[in-house]
Every structure is written in structure tokens, then in C-alpha cells.
Image (spheres, rainbow, N blue to C red):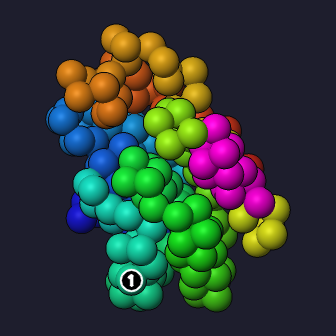
Amino acid sequence: MMSTGFARAGPAILVYGDSLSAAYGIARNEGWVTLLEQRLRQRHLDYTVANASISGETSSGGASRIAATLAQHRPRIVILALGANDGLRGLPVAQLRDNLAAIIRAAQKAGSRVLLVGMKMPPNYGPQYTREFEQAYAALAKQHKTAFVPFLLEGIDGKRDSFLDDNLHPTAQVQPLILENVWAGLAPLLR
């Protein structure tokens, strides 16, 4: 886990995601989470950023470790960006919803504000699964009254040169675009 910040330790922002937030396949300092730290510093916003993202993490893995992670970092804000691996594995959408809801409830109970970051799936598992998967995020955000970013990869999906050779993980060049997607939902929580 990466935990860096400022000379004065301000309130924490916890990034709780998978390889898309763990800078998989690129230098850690090129990932959107590090770019977020830099932006906070540049704008003199006194927050520390703790990246508890794990490559390959599913929503069930995230749900199983959320209590300990919240206790360790005591975040004011949780950026929840899990679910891509559930979708890639074709796991049931109901399971995704239940796990994300458990994470959101735990974070809110601990006094954290939550920014839920949605994910979309390619049509491999059919239109019904793809639609239900995408809609699960919006429904959770509404039900739990969280801040919401509909799609982490908005504006880069479908662009082959935006991804590494695995066609799953974004290149260093598009990390600033991912940061902009997240920032749109995060900025109002920083006030």
C-alpha cells in the first residue's frame, strides 16, 4: 500500500480499487492516484492519499478487507473503484452490488464520505449482463447517497492506443484523463 502526503498529515483520501488504480503496467508515479496527490499539493489542499488498491482485486476481496483498511487509514473520503475484475470474470451482478454496498456502508459508518466510481464491461457476457453491471453502480450511488462517477475510463474506452498490450490497462499517457474523470466527482467533496 502506498501512503504518501504532505509535511502536515491532513485528512486521508483512501483510494480503494484494483489494478486500474494501482498503476498496473506503468510506473507508480505515472498513475492517476499519484497525479491526484500532485494536484492536491498544487492546490494547497491539505489531504494525504492512501492507495489501498490491489491488482486483481474483486468486490468480495475488497469487502473482506475494508474494516481493517478503514481502521488503518481513518479516511475522510473513500474513492471506491472496484468491480472491473468481477465483470471480467462474469461474476453475478447481485454479488457485486452486495459487496459494494457492504463497503459503502462500512465507510459511511466510519464517518467517511464515499465517491463511487463506476465501471462498464465489454459486451462479452451479453447485453443484459453488461446493462445490469453498469446500472448497479448508479443504483448503489442513489441508494446510499454517495458521490458518483459513472465510468472510470470515460473518454478512453474503445481507443486501442490508450491501453497497454493487454488491452485492459490504460497507458501512462491517459492517466491524466482518468484523474479528470475522478476529480469531477471528488472536487465537491473537498469543500
Residue at mark 1 = 64
Q: How many marks?
A: 1
Q: Position of residue 106 (x, y in %)?
A: 57, 84
Q: Few, some or many C-alpha atoms within 10 Å of disc 1 (few <14, some 14-19, many ≥20)?
A: some
Residue at position x 55%, y 45% from top? 119
Q: In this view, does 71 lie above or below 132?
A: below
Q: Can I make out residue 48 in this image?
A: no
Residue at position x 68%, y 57% from top? 136
Residue at position x 60%, y 76% from top? 98
The N terminus is located in which quarter? bottom left
Boundaries of the magenta span: 127-139
Q: Can I make out residue 102 in this image?
A: yes
- The image quarter containing residue 53 is bottom left
Residue 69 highlighted magenta (yes or no): no
Q: Judge left or right: residue 4 versus residue 45.
A: left
Q: Position of residue 169 (x, y in %)?
A: 31, 33
Q: Position of residue 69 (x, y in %)?
A: 38, 80
Mark 1: amino acid = Ser
The C terminus is located in which quarter? bottom right
Considering depth in this image, is 178 or 166 the residue closer to the camera?
166
Task: State the predominant SS element of the stretch in magenta.
Answer: helix
